[in-house]
Image (cartoon, helix red, strand yellow):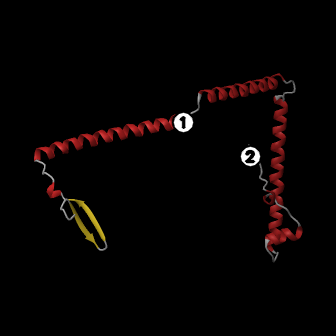
C-alpha cells in the first residue's frame, strides 16, 4: 500500500486492501464488446449444460426408483405362483359338489326379506310404545332406557339391511 501497488480503505477498525485499478491498462470498446459476447456465449453454454444435468439427474432418479431385472424376475415368479394358487382354488370351487341350488338361494333370500320385514315392524311397534310412555315420563329418554334396561340397535351399532 505504501508503494502504491495496492490500495487500502479503513472501515472503523477493519482495513481492506484491493488492487489499484488505475495502474491497469484500460480496455477498448472493441475488447469490451468481444468479452461481453464471450460472456453471453459462455452463459448460454452453462445454461444448456445445467439443463442437460437436470435431465440426466431426473433420468437417474427414475432409473434408481425402478426395479432391477432380478427384482422383476422375482416379482414375476411371485405373481405366477399367486396365479397358479388362485387357478387351483377356482378349479376346486368349480369341481365341488355341494353347490347351492337356485331354489335354495331363493328360499334363503325370501326368508331374509321376511325376517327383515318382521324386524322393522316390531321395531316400529316398540318405538311407538316407548314414545307413548315417554310422553308422561318426567325424565329423559336415555334415563328411562337405563332404568328399564332397554338396549337399542344403535347401542350395539346394528343396522337393518337395506330393503331389496
Quarter holding the C terminus is top right
Is 30 in front, or is 104?
30
Q: Nearer the viewer, residue 10 or 68?
A: 10
Report x, y in % for residue 58: 46, 38
Residue 21 in the image, given as x and y percentages of width and height: 17, 57
Compared to 91, does 22 lie above or below? below
Q: Are marks 1 and 2 in contact (CB under 8 Å)?
A: no
Q: Viewer-proximal residue, 6 or 12?
A: 6
Q: Residue at x 66, y 29 (%)?
A: 75
Secondary structure under tag 1 reads helix
Q: Residues within 10 Å of mark 2 (few under 14, many from 20)?
A: few
Q: Is residue 6 above or below residue 42?
A: below
In percent of width and height, residue 112 lies at 82, 43
Q: Is residue 64 left or right of residue 140?
A: left
Mark closer to the chain start, 1 or 2: 1
**Residue 70 % position (x, y):** 63, 27
Residue on which disc 2 sits: 163
Count all numbered tags in the image, as a single digit: 2
Give the residue displayed 84% in from the left and 55% down from the top: 122
Q: On the image, which quarter does residue 132 sit in?
A: bottom right
User: Which residue occupies the extreme bottom position in the image?
Assistant: 138
Local crowd size for mark 1, using a 10 Å CA cut-off: few (<14), some (14–19), many (≥20): few
Q: What label sits on residue 138 in the rendered view? A: none
Which mark, by number, is residue 64? 1
Q: Nearer the viewer, residue 98 or 103?
A: 98
Seen as rendered, the residue at the extreme right is 148
Relative to residue 64, is residue 84 drawn left or right?
right
Q: What SS does tag 2 mark?
A: loop
Q: Residue furthest front?
A: 3
Q: Quadrant of residue 78?
A: top right
Amino acid at each position: 500500500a505504501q508503494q502504491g501497488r495496492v490500495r487500502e480503505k479503513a472501515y472503523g477498525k477493519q482495513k481492506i486492501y484491493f488492487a489499484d485499478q488505475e495502474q491497469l491498462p484500460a480496455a477498448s470498446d472493441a475488447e469490451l464488446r468481444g468479452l461481453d459476447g464471450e460472456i453471453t456465449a459462455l452463459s448460454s453454454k452453462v445454461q444448456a449444460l445445467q439443463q442437460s444435468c437436470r435431465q440426466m439427474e431426473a433420468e437417474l432418479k427414475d432409473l434408481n426408483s425402478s426395479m432391477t431385472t432380478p427384482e422383476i424376475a422375482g416379482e414375476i415368479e411371485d405373481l405366477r405362483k399367486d396365479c397358479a394358487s388362485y387357478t387351483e382354488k377356482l378349479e376346486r370351487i368349480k369341481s365341488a359338489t355341494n353347490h347351492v341350488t337356485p331354489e335354495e338361494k331363493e328360499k334363503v333370500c325370501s326368508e331374509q326379506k321376511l325376517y327383515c320385514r318382521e324386524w322393522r315392524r316390531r321395531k316400529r311397534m316398540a318405538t311407538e310404545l316407548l314414545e307413548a310412555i315417554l310422553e308422561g315420563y318426567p325424565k329423559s329418554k336415555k334415563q328411562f332406557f337405563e332404568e328399564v334396561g332397554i338396549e337399542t340397535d344403535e347401542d350395539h351399532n346394528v343396522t337393518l339391511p337395506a330393503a331389496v
